[in-house]
């Protein structure tokens, strides 16, 4: 498979190159040159397969030319062998039609592990035998950072510099990052929001004076390999609920538009997806974009669902590119317009294309709490604030009565224990495998959110090319 940039002016790459590159050199994001498809028979053939076998069937076309099926299977077996549930991503039924897809059984208790456990192994494999030293710079609203750090701690050939907004991640999220003392892991708390941290990372990639000095790479969901790994669980869940004979809807708690874009890819590959519900908290740029065509950046409001406190959704560019006829020059112009004015309108073609598959909803604090209580009182399920936003939107969505609705349960409730306790009165326990997280030593730097401060800190510690 070959990969092209959404802005049309970066080199075409293969899977190995696209994994190591992250962001494209023209500022765009990489997407497959064309969408592979699975026939209805092939989708029916996924019934009863294990998670690992499903993963191989779904991802094989994307890694073609770089990994064969056996190599892919062995990486998947290793990555998903670290999950605490034998089904990897089990489905839980809430009522006649509402389901949860639990994506939080990995090492750091959020769905980011599904992609990052695999990505860590891909990096290791692609760097083995070379003397290349890759410098990963990332911004995290909490979960990407902890998942990436778990996946990459102690691995040869990789240094990780992870920026998080100081005081705006939960204690569990912070500790999962800052108690990893491996010498290749560098945590940086910056003054500012997640969007500020993400803008700093983008600026580093786009500054030739800085990016030219290091082999920079990304583990944010701008990295294609992450999205690819997330396509798998849409297939896995849907075939268990009757696909390809029955369409299934998904409600996705959304921030950077990565997880739900993976659902779009699944639909493009032939999975009968009745609807993708994009659920946001009060940071609702995506809801405004999808319902009114207005993609304009607001100010970030901190909420109990911090992984969705985002007002610029990087992966939305991939959708705009695909819906806009895959015209790199047009996407470049549209994104430059957004970058200079912090606002843009979707074209009619983009709006029509989006409304054929997506719905969207904005869920406030009260409705989030109500959804948590409903899940607990109705089905005995304690859910986290992000999942609750997805579930609130799922229950409000207008869909045919015979379509099952799967809410992606993106985090373990104990990762956001304070918020869960406030809403439900129940304090979810951290799984025993988290051990002594609250007794371990923490290590991180605190820096102002300026380009000079952060690049200065990284330049002193990273290995130059
Ligand atoms: C990252 C994250 C999200 C948002 O996912 P995107 O891919 O950024 O849209 C939602 N919930 C949790 C718990 C997360 O960690």
Image: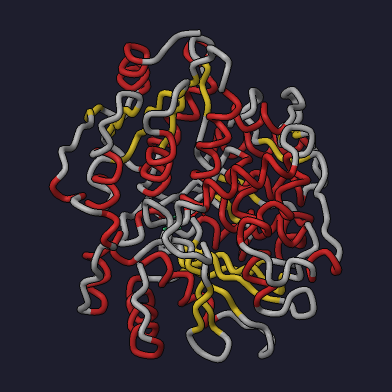
Q: Nearer the viewer, residue 116 or 269?
A: 116
Residue 208 coordinates in the image, percent (x, y): 54, 13
| Image point (20%, 79%), residue name | 425
In this rendered view, identify the residue nearer to me: 194 or 22: 22
Q: Residue at x 71, y 40 (%)?
A: 31
- Residue drawn at x 32%, y 59% is 303
Q: Quadrant of the N terminus?
A: top right
Q: How is the image coloured?
A: secondary structure
Q: Is residue 342 above or below residue 405?
A: above
Q: Position of residue 413 (x, y in %)?
A: 33, 67
Question: In the displayed structure, would residue 59 be above or below residue 26?
Answer: below
- Which residue is at a point 54% across and 62% down the rendered structure image? 287
Asked which quadrant contains residue 236, the reply is bottom right
The answer to which quarter of the image holds residue 38 is: bottom right
Left or right, 284 with respect to 171, comes to right
Q: 180 or 86: which is nearer to us?
A: 86
């Amino acid at each position: 498979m070959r990969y092209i940039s959404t802005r049309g002016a970066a080199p075409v790459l293969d899977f190995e190159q696209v994994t190591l590159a992250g962001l494209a050199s023209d500022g765009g994001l990489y997407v497959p040159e064309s969408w592979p498809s699975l026939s209805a028979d092939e989708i029916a053939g996924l019934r009863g397969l294990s998670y690992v076998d499903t993963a191989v069937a779904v991802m094989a076309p994307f890694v073609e030319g770089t990994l064969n099926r056996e190599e892919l299977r062995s990486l998947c077996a290793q990555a998903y062998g670290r999950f605490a549930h034998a089904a990897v991503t089990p489905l839980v039924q809430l009522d006649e039609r509402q389901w949860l897809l639990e994506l939080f059984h990995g090492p750091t208790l959020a769905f980011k592990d599904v992609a990052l456990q695999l990505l860590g192994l891909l990096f290791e494999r692609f760097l083995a035998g070379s003397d290349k030293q890759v410098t990963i710079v990332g911004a995290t609203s909490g979960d990407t950072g902890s998942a990436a750090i778990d996946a990459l701690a102690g691995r040869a050939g990789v240094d990780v510099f992870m920026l998080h907004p100081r005081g705006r991640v939960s204690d569990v999220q912070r500790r999962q990052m800052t108690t990893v003392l491996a010498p290749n892991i560098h945590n940086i708390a910056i003054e500012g929001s997640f969007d500020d941290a993400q803008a700093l990372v983008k600026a580093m990639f786009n500054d030739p004076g800085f990016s030219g000095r290091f082999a920079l790479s990304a583990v944010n969901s701008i990295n294609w390999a992450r999205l690819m790994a997330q396509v798998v669980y849409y297939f896995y869940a849907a075939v268990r609920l009757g696909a390809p004979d029955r369409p299934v809807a998904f409600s996705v708690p959304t921030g950077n538009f990565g997880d739900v874009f993976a659902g779009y890819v699944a639909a493009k590959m032939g999975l009968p997806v009745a609807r993708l519900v994009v659920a946001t908290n009060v940071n609702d740029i995506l809801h405004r974009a999808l319902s009114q065509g207005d993609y304009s950046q607001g100010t970030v409001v901190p909420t109990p669902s911090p992984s969705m406190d985002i007002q610029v959704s990087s992966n939305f560019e991939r959708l705009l590119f695909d819906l806009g006829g895959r015209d790199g020059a047009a996407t470049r112009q549209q994104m430059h317009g957004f970058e200079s004015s912090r606002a843009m309108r979707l074209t009619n073609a983009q709006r029509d294309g989006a409304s054929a598959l997506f719905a969207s909803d904005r869920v406030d604090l009260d409705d989030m709490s109500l959804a948590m209580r409903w899940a607990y009182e109705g089905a005995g399920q304690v859910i986290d604030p992000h999942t609750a936003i997805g579930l609130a939107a799922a229950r409000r969505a207008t869909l045919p009565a015979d379509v099952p609705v799967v809410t992606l349960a993106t985090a373990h409730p104990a990762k956001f224990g304070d918020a869960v306790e406030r809403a439900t009165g129940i304090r979810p326990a951290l799984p025993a495998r988290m051990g002594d997280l609250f007794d371990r030593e923490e290590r991180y730097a605190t820096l102002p959110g300026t380009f000079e401060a952060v690049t200065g800190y990284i330049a002193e510690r990273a290995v130059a090319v």
